[in-house]
Image (cartoon, grey):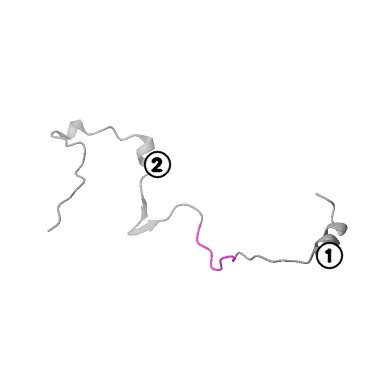
Amino acid sequence: MTENKCPSATTWKDPDDAPELTDAFFAQADVFVGDKLVRRGRPKVEQTKQALTVRYDVEVIEAFKATGAGD
């Protein structure tokens, strides 16, 4: 059997010694709706984007620059 190598740094002998639960503590807590964990952050998209590298001839780039606003 493996032993827990990182025991808790603080061992409380009395429940009153536990730290106070603040709003910041609850802001970091996991949120459940029923038994389902509500994920935080940006939702997953069905179709992800793919990065590409494209190489153009100098003449093609100059033609595009000539038609643009110059920004």
Residue contact between numbered discs 1 and 2, judged by CB atoms under 8 Å = no
The residue located at (48%, 52%) in the rendering is 41
- The residue positioned 34% from the left and 58% from the top of the image is 34
Amino acid type of the residue that numbered disc 1 sits on in the rendered structure: Glu
Residue 36 position, x and y percent, is 36, 59
Residue 6: quadrant of the picture: top left
Is 63 situated left or right of 27 in this image?
Answer: right
Q: Where residue 68 appears, x then y in whole percent?
A: 84, 56
| Callout 1 crowding tier (Cα within 10 Å): few <14, some 14–19, many ≥20 | few
Which disc is residue 59 wearing? 1
- Please report the bounds of the magenta region as a residue range: 43-50
Q: Is residue 34 magenta?
A: no
**Figure quadrant of residue 54:** bottom right
Q: Mark 1 or mark 2: which comes first in sequence?
A: 2
What predominant SS class does the magenta segment belong to? Answer: loop
Label 1: state its secondary structure.
helix
Q: In this picture, is 69 found above or below 8?
A: below
| Image spot of residue 55 (x, y percent) | 71, 66
Please name the amino acid that badge 2 sits on.
Answer: Ala
Asked if 54 appears above or below 66 in the picture, the reply is: below
Give the residue at mark 2.
27
Q: Residue furthest front?
A: 58
- Label 2, residues with CA under 10 Å away: few <14, some 14-19, many ≥20: few
Query: What is the distance, in whole Å, between disc 1 and disc 2 at their CAs?
Result: 56 Å
